[in-house]
Amino acid sequence: MNAAPSALQNQTSVISLGASGLDRGVESSGAPLVRLQWQPVGDGSPEVAWSLAQLVGDACDADCLGSRIDRANAEVLERILTAQPVWVDVAAHAFEVWPDMGRTLLHAGPPIAWNEMCGPMKGAVVGAILYEKWATTQQEAEQLVAAGGIRFAPCHEFGAVGPMTGIISPSMPLFVVLNQTTGNRAYAPMMESGGAKTLRFGAFAPEVIEGLKLIENVLAPCLKAAVAGIDGGLPLKPLISQSLHMGDDVHNRNTAATLLLYRAVTESLLKSSISRDLVRETLRTIGADDMFFLSLSMAACKATMDAAHGVPFSSIVTAMARNGVNVGIRVSGLNGQWFVGPADIPVGLFLPGFSEADANPDIGDSAITETAGLGAFAMAAAPAMVQFVGGTPQDALRYSREMAHVTIGRNPGFTLPMLDFIGAPVGIDIRKVVDENMRPVINTATAHKEPGMGIIGAGVVQAPMKCFVDAVGALATAAAS
Amino acid sequence: MAIQSSIRANLYKDSVSLMRISQVTIARTGVQRVTLLMGTRSNKEFLQQAGLMSPALESAKPGDIMIVVADDAPDKIAAAEREIHSQIAGEEPKGGSTEAAAEAPPRSIAGGVAIADHADLALISVPGPYAAAEALKALRRGLNVLLFSDSVPIEQEVAIKRVAAQKGLLVMGPDCGTAIINGVPLGFANVVRRGAIGLVGASGTGLQEVMCQIHRHGHGISQAIGTGSHDVSSEVGGITMLQGLELLAADAQTKVVAIVSKPPAPDVQQRVIERARAIGKPVVICFLGGEPAASAGNVHRTSSLEETARQAVALAGARQPGSDEQSAEALATKVCGSLTPSQRYLRGLYSGGTFCSEAQTIWRAAGIRARSNAPLAGAERLADVEESRGHMAIDLGSDEFTVGRPHPMIDYGVRIERLLKEAGDPTVACIVLDVVLGYGSHPNPAEILAPAIRRAKAAARAQGRELAVICFVCGTDADPQPYETQKGMLADAGAEIVGSSTSAARASQAIASRMAADDSANGRRAMQGGER
């Protein structure tokens, strides 16, 4: 037994947690004292608390599980911070990226079966089938799905991300973002204009299908030419960094980023041999939609976080995604597993005529932005956003401050002016989420629960604790074996 | 009585906060009973036993508050529930402003370490099922731990103590009520002067009593290291006690070491004694309730708290402290003259577990068989703690009295209730009460206890007999509740005040022995046909 005399040699500086009153002697003695506002970890289960404690790092014990996790996380953070996502291409069709996809539809969030999908996602599935001409009516489309004629898979498992329902079908064009540091690519479908009547909100009326065709036939070729005209592609990190300084969070507010994109493609389009009409149509589409940049923002984050995935022992979240029923997370050190929990209804403002009763639970892959340290984590950059939740600009700062408690680092590439240009918090550690009993915050739009009714509001939502608690349990098991 | 149950989901509050809310609610609404408990399994079992469990509470999770309100009047129940909810809401941190966010206290050990001034000790009193996890997190960050919490699984205790030992850190506890580290009082602790005597102890009130007596003898404490009550079991192997010995051996300020503990498991006892022999400083060992053992070399064995304090003070280089208090026999003489022959039994109502053990040890040595809810090894366990029969030594700080209630050192309610009940028993000769001062304890116990003693004595008198009440005060003149004032208030109420737990046990024993002797003498006289 090695009883070092350290216990009696230091000054005695106390951290007190639990019942009040037991530290009164400490207080009276004048010794330094910090009182915690202690809450049981995660879901309040003692078993999880004990598992979690096994995963805490120790500066004096490099071999303990927690220290191994800390080292793996340092590697993950390095990969996140050094990522260089660049918009390099537009794939004219998804099937060119994944030639074997056949009749596969990719969707947002963790895996889900047809009969469990929420209304908007079912509507989007029908719309995609009509768009692909695998059926001609809603009924036929539903029969086709019911008969097992369609394979479903999460976008995330294909290196892709999709907003809201996130449906990607083989004919859809995709933005292609390359992480130049590691060479991996990420994909996202283009934002449809048209407000409520969009596939991403589950609409499948004829004009929605026409809109998709417009993207396929006009927008995609034009933007493919535009990006080809930008030497080396368009680096997204500097663009995002700049837009944070212009009031965006690049999740729920993309006004500045979309303008910066507009500026970047305009000259390139005008230089190209594309007809003036098509150029005008393309610029009109981008210019009419403040959220147009979201697809590129998401793809940039996905290219970053995929590079951070797969580091053994790491407890960092590399995907956080919602399918309208469940929220799922993936963890770098826990390979392909999804950890799911029930999705909440976002808290925020509703458009006139709608209420929480109309809202679908949280949906979309766009929480990849929070996963990569943007969105609500960078809310301090976007004070206008807090109007959705009836807050003050101070609340915007609070979100960014609080999320620093559940992350392992800060991104010096994405600085927050209102917080003295400190980097946005990045790298969600499942251990910290459970230990601090603090769920990651996500900025989001709210979809109507009926297909095709579109956006009915916006606000904030938190990922369910269950995802993180289950992941901690799995990491404890995996790391110990 | 109607009982209304409900759940406030997803809000943890510690038991003290919940009890405060209960008290305020009862005070403000006059409702008969309010029970607020977190939805843990053991709390549900407690409600079950108390007949307060209802189907509405089945779904409560450990992070939910269970609310049970009982009264005859439905409107009182409703008013109480409103009050409870407003109390709960009123305590939540005000959100919204930056300042609140910026200054929000940390929630985790990691958060605390981040803002603390070189934290090196965690004082943990969270519910037992979570406590070892918090301790392990603290150890991993290089903090020593005082684990006040009890009900920590033994395998978790062993696991954290092994990690601590490997890292050269201390885990005091689980179930460790007191310690003084570098002059900083932790948990229930008295204010004592610093000095040359280092203490290690598995019994909280035992440590408190010994350190107070040392202080009153004019000496002081270098360190007081609590080990928690399970440390000296075979499973744990005395890890903390042995570490504590090493620390005190190496501590330059410590000239004399004293160990106060219930008897350790035989293998642990052997290791502790072997280690004590080798540390090169005098060691006083009191394994209270164990077999008497002879002193040898630097190891001095004692069998009472009083003797332990005296021996340590003597070894620290002072002359043997004198005694100015009346002897046990003198007190018995004074008291017994006014008792009636039916009054034969002792009732010790203790808030300190060690005092309960010490009394049983001293009484047993004099042939007095007392029953207890915390019996010595081999003694009879009290089947029903509500029972009052024969000689009894009751530890009111043990689990059956403290689930969902504050400790009797903080809340004298249960003890006073029991005092009055025993006072009505014509077979009771003497009631023994401890009064523990210091941080953590009731801010002014004599103020509560003195009127109760008056009532108890008056009640006995109304039934035509006197009642002896012996009190001792575990405290010092430097405590937040001044020692002499507390003693004076109790003496004014008619209590016999003695200077130590040991004296109280001896004096009460003397009373019981005399009453038994008188009784058998009366019996002999009766058989011999009356007066000669």
Image: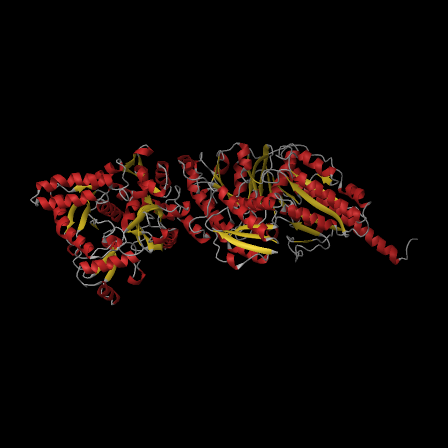
Q: Quadrant of the N terminus of chain B?
A: bottom right
Residue sitting at x 19%, y 60%: A130
Farthest bottom residue in view? A147
A52, B521: nearer the viewer: A52
Q: Residue furthest left?
A: A273
- Please indicate, yes or no, whether residue B293 appears anywhere in the rendered image: no
> B360 or B496, which is in the foreground?
B496
| x 55%, y 45%: residue | B21
Q: Pinpoint residue B93: horizontal percent, then vertical percent.
A: 46, 40
- Tell me if I can see residue A416 in this picture: yes
| Rendered position, B366 above or below A256 | below
Q: Tell me residue A258's x, y (percent).
A: 21, 41
Q: Quadrant of residue A165?
A: bottom left
Side (left or right) of B38 relative to B191: left
Image position of A476 (left or right of B47): left
Q: Is residue B112 above or below residue B289?
A: above
Towards the viewer: A450 or A98: A450
Give residue B381's position: percent from left, percent from top: 65, 56
